[in-house]
Image (cartoon, helix red, strand yellow):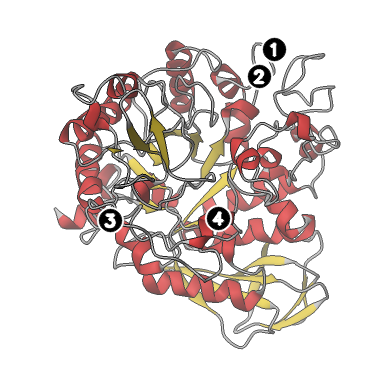
């Protein structure tokens, strides 16, 4: 029993589960495809573009929230966990999308937001009516301190205190994010049961797994102790303003959290007979023992605790290698790694690293050991789009000005073709966020005609990854003795052996190979060069995949 669990639930005939060899593709539904000319993407729009995902070569579609919501945080403030917001379509639209994806061999992962609801959720509406309401304890209500003041010093990630006073009942409620996103009380068994029922609803509908939003936040210190002050740099990969002034010791990740994920895992496993269901946890913890603890002592918690360590790593060969080696060393036996370079909360890879380095970053992401996640548009090299102040939508940027925390630039519409709206919406319709100025020139349509495009590179890398056991299953072994600007490693599975080399230099670099190569399987440059039997010439920021002799 434990052996099966260590694999996360085997696939057909004892094969590894699909998520171990697969690639996940994230869609932010507001920005992927608008099917009804209202300027906002929707579920029928995603269904209409599934052929792009199959042509790309990914294995699973992760859809960010589409539940009924007041949209204070664009769907991460959920008012109904078992519905579809009309802006995105209907439940019938979801069912058709799910069937169409499964018909193409694509798995479907949906977002689950368990830490908090919308303040418009019926549970919170009941909870705030009176202190005696049966659902009062669904949320964290507390009196102020004696003599006045907040219950404790906890801060909201989105700026300001994490407590809001509700005059109706004379108490404060906790919100780790917006005041419109009250935190659920996961110590209440009724909350746990109700939330597990929401998972069961979607599992019975046929979804293949869940991405769990802020998975480390669910359980707080039961005594609600003050967080200690911090004098260190931000624990995140970017400055967070006042939030950085504390060590977030008590407002998240209490050890009791692991029993919650063991319970969730039992539910997933019960639905996963013959078709493993996957859990992916958004966990912004950069202390590796804390992060990998979410796999569970017996690999019985989250299948893939999201690994964001590359986001806070300087883009230099030695630093990236240290990060990869540290993660490999920290993984419990049998745990499967994963890697992330972009998502709906982060500046686009092409904007952070530059267009040329974004190509080698894609090669690295798709050749490291573990499950990679791609963010929609990164296969085109989409960059952040400047957002005029009057078009800004993201509440984080508005609540914490001056720190560039607004996430609108990385959430702009997908580039499909050279038409007026880049194929995202109907002509003459204004998209919910501005399109990039070069959207038509950098579209799927344009790049599909260019063998040197980012799209062509991504398709080639995904095809190679699928075809080579060394890349989708194999071991990882870093290569020593390389030039300081080069990170190189071996991937091996049985007799299938490849070497990956990525240059982080802005100048040409020569690399000595440990053995005679059979040839170059992929490169970010159109003209890769082997110089003799044991020498490789890398152009600036070039990455290559080399086949080694059998």
Q: Nearer the viewer, mark 3 or mark 2?
A: 3
Percent x, y for residue 244?
52, 60
Placement of 303 over or under 61, stated as above or below: below
Q: Relative to 171, say whether 370 is above or below.
A: below
Residue reaching furthest to the front: 147
SS at circle 4: helix
Name the residue carrying label 2. Answer: 34
Q: Is residue 25 left or right of residue 377?
A: left
Q: Which mark is residue 37?
A: 1
Callout 1 secondary element:
loop
Give the CA separation, mark 2 to mark 4.
37 Å
Estimate the spatial distance between the alpha carbons at disc 4 and disc 3, rounded to whole Å: 22 Å
Residue under pointer 3: 254
Local SS, label 3: loop
Under circle 2, the secondary element is: loop
Residue count near mark 3 (Cα–Cα under 10 Å), binned few <14, some 14–19, many ≥20 = some
**Residue at left 29%, top 27%?**
198
Q: Position of residue 48 (x, y in %)?
A: 60, 20
Q: Residue at x 43, y 44 (%)?
A: 162
User: What whole-number distance in Å separates the C-alpha atoms at marks 3 and 2?
Assistant: 41 Å
Answer few, some or many: residues within 10 Å of disc 1's Cα (few below 14, many 20 plus, some between 14 and 19). Answer: some
Q: Mark 4 highlights which residue?
A: 242
Mark closest to the chain's N terminus, 2 or 4:
2
Q: Is residue 131 left or right of residue 439?
A: left
Are the residues tagged 1 and 3 within 8 Å (C-beta)? no
- How many numbered marks have been drawn onto this rendered protein structure? 4
């Amino acid at each position: 029993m434990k052996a099966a669990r260590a694999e996360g639930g085997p696939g057909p005939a004892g094969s590894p589960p699909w998520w171990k060899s697969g690639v996940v593709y994230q869609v932010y539904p507001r920005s992927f495809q608008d099917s009804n000319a209202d300027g906002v993407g929707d579920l029928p729009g995603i269904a209409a573009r599934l052929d792009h995902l199959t042509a790309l070569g990914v294995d699973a579609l992760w859809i960010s929230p589409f539940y009924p919501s007041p949209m204070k945080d664009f769907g991460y403030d959920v008012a109904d966990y078992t519905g579809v917001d009309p802006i995105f379509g209907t439940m019938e639209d979801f069912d058709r999308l799910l069937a169409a994806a499964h018909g193409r061999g694509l798995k479907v992962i949906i977002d689950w937001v368990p830490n908090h609801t919308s303040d418009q959720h019926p549970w919170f509406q009941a909870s705030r009516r009176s202190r005696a309401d049966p659902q009062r304890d669904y949320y964290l209500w507390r009196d102020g301190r004696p003599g006045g003041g907040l219950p404790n010093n906890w801060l909201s990630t989105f700026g300001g205190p994490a407590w809001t006073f509700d005059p109706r009942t004379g108490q404060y409620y906790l919100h780790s994010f917006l005041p419109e996103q009250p935190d659920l009380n996961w110590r209440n068994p009724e909350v746990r049961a109700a939330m597990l029922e929401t998972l069961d609803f979607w599992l019975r509908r046929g979804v293949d797994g869940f991405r769990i939003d802020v998975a480390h936040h669910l359980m707080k210190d039961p005594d609600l102790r003050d967080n200690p002050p911090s004098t260190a740099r931000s624990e995140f990969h970017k400055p967070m303003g006042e939030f950085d002034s504390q060590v977030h010791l008590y407002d998240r990740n209490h050890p009791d959290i692991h029993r919650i994920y063991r319970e969730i895992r039992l539910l997933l496993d019960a639905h996963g007979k013959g078709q493993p269901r996957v859990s992916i946890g958004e966990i912004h913890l950069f202390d590796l023992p804390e992060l990998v603890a979410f796999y569970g002592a017996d690999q019985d918690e989250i299948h893939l605790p999201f690994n964001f360590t590359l986001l806070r790593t300087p883009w230099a060969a030695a630093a990236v290698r240290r990060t990869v080696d540290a993660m490999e060393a920290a993984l419990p036996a049998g745990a499967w790694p994963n890697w992330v370079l972009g998502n709906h909360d982060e500046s686009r890879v092409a904007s952070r690293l530059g267009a040329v380095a974004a190509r080698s970053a894609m090669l690295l992401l798709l050749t490291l050991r573990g499950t990679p996640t791609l963010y929609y548009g990164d296969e085109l090299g989409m960059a952040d789009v400047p957002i005029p102040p009057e078009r800004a939508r993201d509440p984080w940027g508005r609540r914490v000005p001056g720190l560039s925390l607004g996430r609108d630039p990385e959430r702009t519409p997908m580039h499909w073709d050279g038409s007026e709206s880049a194929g995202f919406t109907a002509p003459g319709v204004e998209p919910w966020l501005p399109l990039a100025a070069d959207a038509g020139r950098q579209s799927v349509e344009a790049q599909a005609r260019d063998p040197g495009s980012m799209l062509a590179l991504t398709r080639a890398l995904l095809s190679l990854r699928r075809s080579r056991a060394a890349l989708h299953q194999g071991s990882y072994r870093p290569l020593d003795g390389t030039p300081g600007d080069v990170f190189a490693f071996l991937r091996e599975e049985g007799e299938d052996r490849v070497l990956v080399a990525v240059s982080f230099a802005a100048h040409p670099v020569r690399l000595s190979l440990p053995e005679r190569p059979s040839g170059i399987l992929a490169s970010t440059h159109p003209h890769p060069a082997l110089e003799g039997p044991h020498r490789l010439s890398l152009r600036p920021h070039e990455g290559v995949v080399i086949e080694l002799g059998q």
